[in-house]
Amino acid sequence: MKFIKSLLSVALLTFICLSAYSQTPTGQIYFMRSTGYNGAAVNVRIYVDDQLVCKLKNNRFSIHDMAVGKHVVTVQPTGISNGKKSDPITVEVAEGKANYVNVVQRVSGYASYLSCEEVTQSSADNTLKKIKQTTDCGVTENK
């Protein structure tokens, strides 16, 4: 009986060690939106590598775990729009590190459009103090 318990203990320990090593390393991306009154009534769709990850309301931020490596981020307004995504930016995610992406509203002549930009942690800290975190991004995953 002791032999079986010892064998099970070794098997369990081996399983735990192997599962710890098989996890994909991740970092985080914070998506922040504080675009003022223009377009505040509609959500913004945030895409990472052409996959919808969040429908973000104004004055909100969301945190997403991402695999280490380069990721392409774009945004698209909901509601009445031309349906085009913003110009893409590339975000380099490092293991255990946080990246900060701000959704900004740009004006060109009479038209306004959304884009995204990566910002530093100190800039993000100022924005994060003023807005609320959302954990419900309104995206259902197809599994």
Image (cartoon, grey):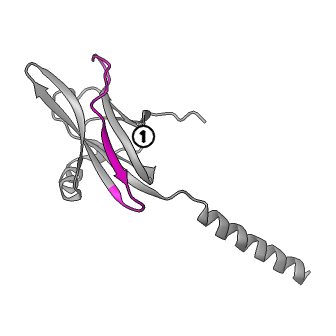
Task: Magenta stretch: give its range.
Answer: 77-98
Q: Nearer the viewer, residue 76 or 25?
A: 25
Height in image: 9 above or below 68? Answer: below
Q: Residue furthest bottom?
A: 2
The image shows residue 90, relative to residue 28, as above or below, that is above
- Residue 77 placed where, x, y %? 29, 26
Quarter holding residue 86: top left
Q: Is residue 127 left or right of residue 136?
A: left
Q: Position of residue 118 (x, y in %)?
A: 25, 47
Look at the image and tell me in which quarter the N terminus lies.
bottom right
Give yes or no for residue 94 being in the magenta stretch: yes
- Name which residue lies at 72% across and 71% down: 14
Please name the residue shown 20% across and 26% down the image: 113
Element type at marker 1?
loop
- Outermost left residue: 109
The answer to whether 102 appears left or right of 141 in the picture is left
Residue 43 appears in the rendering: no
What amino acid is found at the position of numbered circle 1 in the picture? Asp
Which residue is disc 1 drawn over? 136
The residue that appears at 44% across and 50% down in the rendered structure is: 66
- Which residue shows up at 44% across the image and 51% down it? 65
The crowding category of the residue bearing disc 1, from other C-alpha atoms within 10 Å (few below 14, some 14 to 19, many at least 20), is few
**How many marks do you count on the picture?**
1
